[in-house]
Image (cartoon, rainbow, N blue to C red):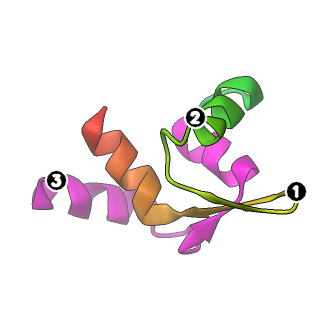
């Protein structure tokens, strides 16, 4: 992971909490609902599911963007 990329995305997403929900993930990535949940279900973006709730670390979103 490039430090410059990481700093760029951290600045871009500074208004989001350290842990986001799927609706916030949709906003961050500009994806639709189906694509967002597919990424979560396939663990393309690291997350934990507790009951019906997804716990998504913001750093996982940043790592996904840098990788892809």
For label 1, the crowd category at 10 Å Cα-Cα, with few meaning under 14, some 14 to 19 and many 20 or more, is few
Query: Residue 25: horizontal and vertical position, in percent?
Result: 62, 48
27, 52: nearer the viewer: 52
Give the side of residue 54 with respect to residue 58, left or right.
right
Tags 2 and 1 in contact by the CB under 8 Å rule? no
The quarter of the picture where residue 64 lies is top left
For label 2, the crowd category at 10 Å Cα-Cα, with few meaning under 14, some 14 to 19 and many 20 or more, is few
Residue assigned mark 2: 42
Label 3 vs 2, first from the N-terminus: 3
Instruction: Please check the rendered image and state whether residue 8 is part of the magenta-colored stretch, yes or no.
Output: yes
Query: Which residue is at a point 31% across and 31% down the rendered structure image?
Result: 68
Part of the protein shown in magenta:
1-29
Label 1 vs 3, first from the N-terminus: 3
Gap between marks 2 and 1 measured at Cα: 16 Å
Give the side of residue 60 with respect to residue 28, left or right.
left
SS of the residue under disc 1:
loop
Query: Residue 32: horizontal and vertical position, in percent?
Result: 70, 26
Q: Residue furthest right?
A: 52
Label 2 vs 1, first from the N-terminus: 2
Q: Check residue 52 in the rendering and tell me which mark sits there, or answer none.
A: 1
SS of the residue under disc 2:
loop
Q: Check residue 3 in the rendering and tell me which mark sits there, or answer none.
A: none
Indicate which label's residue lies in the foreground, 3 or 2: 2
Residue 39 higher or lower than 50, as above or below: above
């Amino acid at each position: 992971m490039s430090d410059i990329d990481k700093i760029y995305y951290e600045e871009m997403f500074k208004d989001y909490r350290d842990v986001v929900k799927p609706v916030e993930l949709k906003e961050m990535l500009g994806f639709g609902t189906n694509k967002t949940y597919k990424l979560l279900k396939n663990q393309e973006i690291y997350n934990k599911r507790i009951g019906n709730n997804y716990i998504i670390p913001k750093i996982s979103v940043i790592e996904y963007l840098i990788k892809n």
